[in-house]
Image: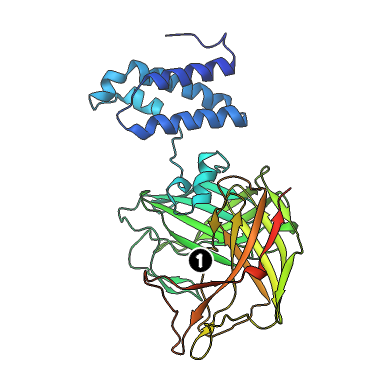
Amino acid sequence: MEKWQNQTEQQVLEHIRSNFRKVQLPVDSYNEQIMNRIEHLETRGGNKLLKKTLAAASIAVVIGLGMITAGFISPAWAETLSQIPVFSSIFKHTENPGLKLAAEQGLTTSPNMSVTKDGVTLSVTEVFYDGIQLAIGFERSGVADERVLAEITNYKTHEFDQSTKGLLGLPEVTLASGEPLGYGSSSTGDVQGQPNTLLLELRELHNTSTLGDEFKVNIRVPVAQIAEPFEFEVTVKKLAEGIINLTPGQGASKGSFHYKVKSLDITPAAMRLVITSDGEVPASPEQTGEYGPTEVFYELVDDAGHVIGPKGIGYAMMKGVQHPIVDNLYNTFPQVPKTITVRPYTMTLDNEPKLLLDADGKPVKTYHKDLETTITIP
């Protein structure tokens, strides 16, 4: 066995990396997970004890390959390997492309906090915050049921199904002061392809300028048939690079309708557009009689022609509804664009009211070319 004491930490990590590249483990994902962990240690400074554990584990994998491929790991090797914190990113399995990208680029943090009560363990495994959204990944163990989030029976009071021990209620996130963390929209749910995991996304966060680049949040997660909630104090760190915050003040008018882009925030994981407007919603000649325009929606188009619509779009079941403030979240563009054009449009309602659909069953969009405005990205 090679000696490590005369080698630098960089040399040790390079040796580990080389060993894992040479070995094809029986489970494909293990190589990637361990390599990601090595990269995490290298970029973030890591921990000397953990690095030594990884070094020993790499030798165990290389020397003990025959035992692994035969479906047997000796207790000694199993104990060594069990010390490696191998987590597969929850965010990589979400339907949110921004979170996937953030995880793939190593932009998330891993608190790896765990609480165990009455045989149930809940861990906070992954956090991402970019000033637009806060995402928190949870992992649960000690429960045989494949379901993680319980059926919520009352969203106002957050009451949930208590029939099965270990099902999770809705997580509650508060600031260190005890005040709730304000947000515009949220989603909570099991993560497809990742058993025993839960993802909480809080979007269009309020008053982010007062939060600073680092702040603490308290997380409380109620669990079915366990009296006290699981509690965590997590330090949230804002993504440090790749963030663009603009306050263009640009807009356009048509008839009595006028809008202005109050702010446009761009991060590697998302975009956020805040628009103020007033006046009557513009209508096309086709939107007359029994037909009328919906509220105004806004697409974003970059200089390469990529078009992105607002996420989670909904509409009022009334014609011509005017919203003084629109706060929308968008997926990010493939690359930071040179310009972004705000492209307003409406859809069409009849008297029922129902949306007018085209031959493909998609809502008919009426674009207002004279209301477009183009923002230069510095």
- Is residue 19 found left or right of 281 in the rendered image? left
Q: In this view, does 338 lie above or below 278?
A: above
Q: Write down the quadrant of residue 28 in the picture.
A: top left
Q: Which residue lies at the image location 34% right of the left edge and 58% below the top edge?
A: 147
Q: Which residue lies at the image location 57% right of the left edge and 43% below the top edge?
A: 109
Residue located beneath label 1 in the image: 312
Q: Is residue 245 above or below residue 154?
A: above
The reply to whether residue 192 is in sight is yes
Q: Quadrant of the N terminus?
A: top left
Q: Which residue lies at the image location 51% right of the left edge and 91% below the top edge?
A: 289
Q: Where is residue 322 in the image (x, y as percent from the top left)?
A: 63, 81
Q: Position of residue 132 (x, y in %)?
A: 63, 56
Amino acid at pointer 1: Gly
Q: Write down the quadrant of residue 31 in the picture.
A: top left
Q: Would you call the spot at circle 1 few (<14 residues within 10 Å), some (14-19), or many (20 or more)?
A: few
Toward the front, the furthest residue is 285
Q: Position of residue 299 (x, y in %)?
A: 58, 63
The front one of 369 and 276 is 369
Q: Where is residue 362 in the image (x, y as percent from the top left)?
A: 41, 70
The colouring scheme, among rainbow, by chain, secondary structure or one colour, is rainbow
Q: Is residue 296 above or below residue 307?
A: below
Q: Which residue lies at the image location 59% right of the left edge and 82% below the top edge?
A: 321
Mark count: 1
